[in-house]
């Protein structure tokens, strides 16, 4: 079984989810509107990602960001919780390490 990592960004307007492998390759992703219901949005994100994820992968880590990151952390038992500014900085550095 190959390792994969789930990231969820849940905000008041939109909710995004992504699953990556150990080399940061995107295995599955989704973007949808939160519609004022973060719990329903997270459930839909997880359902869609599960359908898209190849069977040979197992989620071994979870990270959350966004305005409802602490709610999602509690629901998913996330390993890491970051605010949006930190998430943007880490994402940028992973793609552009010289910045």
Image (cartoon, grey):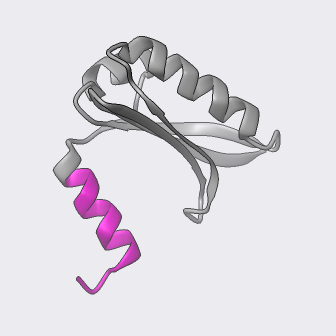
Q: Quadrant of residue 95?
A: bottom left
Is residue 7 depicted above or below 2 in this figure?
above
Q: Which image quadrant is residue 22 in?
A: bottom right
Whether residue 24 sits left or right of residue 71 in the image: it is right
Which residues fall within the magenta stretch? 86-99
* Horizontal and vertical percent position of residue 54: 79, 44
Q: Is residue 91 magenta?
A: yes
| Residue situated furthest bottom in the rendering | 98
Residue 1 in picture, x, y percent from top left = 78, 44
Name the quadrant of the C terminus.
bottom left
Residue at 27%, 35% (x, y): give it: 66
Q: Position of residue 76 (x, y in %)?
A: 45, 21
Q: Residue at x 31, y 69 (%)?
A: 92
Magenta span has 59? no
Which residue is painted at 47% across and 22% down in the image? 42
Q: Main secondary structure of the magenta part?
A: helix
Coordinates of residue 79 in the picture (x, y in percent)? 39, 34
Q: Is residue 8 above or below residue 35?
A: below
Left or right, 55 with reference to 17: right
């Amino acid at each position: 079984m190959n390792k994969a990592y789930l990231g969820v960004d849940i905000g008041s307007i939109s909710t995004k989810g992504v699953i990556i492998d150990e080399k940061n390759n995107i295995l599955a992703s989704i973007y949808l509107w939160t519609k004022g219901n973060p719990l329903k949005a997270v459930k839909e994100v997880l359902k869609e990602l599960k359908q898209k994820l190849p069977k040979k992968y197992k989620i071994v880590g979870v990270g959350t960001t966004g305005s409802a990151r602490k709610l999602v952390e509690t629901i998913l038992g996330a390993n890491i919780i970051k605010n949006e500014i930190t998430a943007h900085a880490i994402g940028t550095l992973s793609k552009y390490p010289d910045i």
